[in-house]
Image: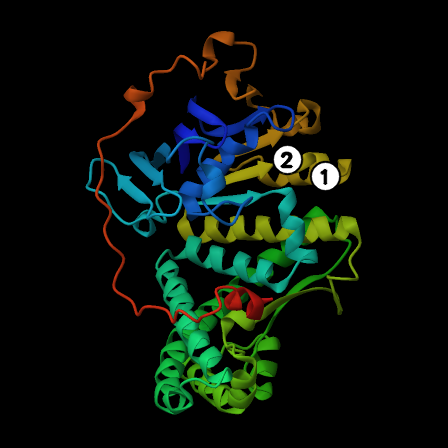
Amino acid sequence: MFVRHLSLVDFRSYPEAEVALTPGITTFVGLNGQGKTNLVEAIGYLATLGSHRVSNDAPLVRAGAERAYVRAAVVREGHEQQLELEINPGRANRARLGRAASTRPREILGTIRTVLFAPEDLALVKGDPSNRRQFLDELLVARQPKWAGARSDYDKILKQRNALLKSARTGHDRGALDATLPVWNEHLATVGANLTYARLRLLRDLRPYIAEAYDEVSAGQGDARLSYRSSLHVKLADELAAGEVPELDAITAGMHETFAEMRRAEVERGVTLVGPHRDEVQLQLGDLPAKGYASHGESWSFALGMRLAAFQLLRHDLGTDPVLVLDDVFAELDGGRRSRLAAMVADAEQVLITAAVADDVPVALSGRRFDVTRGHVAADGDEADAVDLGTVDRDSAETEPVDPEPEPGEPEPDPDADPASDRAVGE
């Protein structure tokens, strides 16, 4: 699997850009603020429908433009497929595969898969639990795209349940609580148990790769472990923390039991305190938690080990390599970690690297190079390959309008619902 061509229209700092890519190693070199990371961010967006730098779409559209287009030609097992996303901040995004009619963006997941390591990944070790949950869920979707729908369904149900609890807390609709809460409990337990079960199976498969990757990156200087800390009742939570993967029915029953235990606390606080949005993936070095105990170098090794483990797991599952993206990471690593990382990824089918200074990239990762200067992308030493953003005919890059497919119907949220409540309970 590799990206053969990338095309951008009004994405980030680029009015237009056309970049021809090849298998093997490609490095984009440019000082900070020149636009090199925007290129790999666009590829990551096609793979995950999200950015590793921002949490909403508005910053992805160039200032003054209404929408942005990201297009790519993706080659997998010898077959090429055209992929397009139209990014519309505040409105539904639209997608297209080849010459087919418009489809929901979620339907293109799996067409291209990426594993991206960036300086922001230090938050996997030092940041909030939400960062580690996101890592696990994004890998879950990369492994099996169907889980994107489950995550979306869970978020919708959670918002509705939170709205009901908040209403009960403020003294409204107390009578409705007894009639309605069991319905939302059933929905949340069904979807939440499936998501928890999938996470546990994923962790079980990922653990050996984590241990091996950390060992290689750190030159054998530690024992990296992951455990799942659940919000379910104590007995079941202890089983999950010990690495057990109960049957799905047992997890569903456990959620219902914990809802009953936590009902009073949930009504008093007006938020849902039980479910995968409250769970934690704990990272350990030996018997100590990495957060708070790991040194800066150990934290980098752990974060890098998690991404490399994800790459190896997907390589094993898919039978082909995902595109590996290393965004401005070599400047953050010492010489030993740079060399060990280079040795581990040099055989990947396609590696895309960004660097402010070319000398930061190990010689073992020498390959094709592009210089990025103020949004101009040029093959090293070849000015003829530069894209002059002021002269490209934008009309030639436009596509015919596509009609978005509406999302399935869903209950309207309570107007009194706190839009920040999901984020608050997930911290």
Q: Nearer the viewer, residue 127 or 351?
A: 127
Q: Residues within 10 Å of mark 2 (few under 14, many from 20)?
A: many
Q: Secondary structure at mark 1?
A: helix
Q: How many marks?
A: 2
Q: According to the image, label 2 marks what residue?
A: 328
For the point 66% across and 29% down, the residue is 361
Q: Residues within 10 Å of mark 1 (few under 14, many from 20)?
A: some
Amino acid type, callout 2? Asp
Amino acid type, callout 1? Glu
The image quarter in which residue 75 lies: top left
Q: Nearer the viewer, residue 344 or 28?
A: 28
Q: Secondary structure at mark 2?
A: loop
Q: According to the image, label 1 marks what residue?
A: 332
For the point 60% across and 86% down, the residue is 234
On the image, the x and y values in percent for residue 408 come to 25, 61
- Residue 322 tag number: none
- Badges 2 and 1: C-beta atoms under 8 Å apart? yes
Q: Is residue 141 left or right of residue 264?
A: left
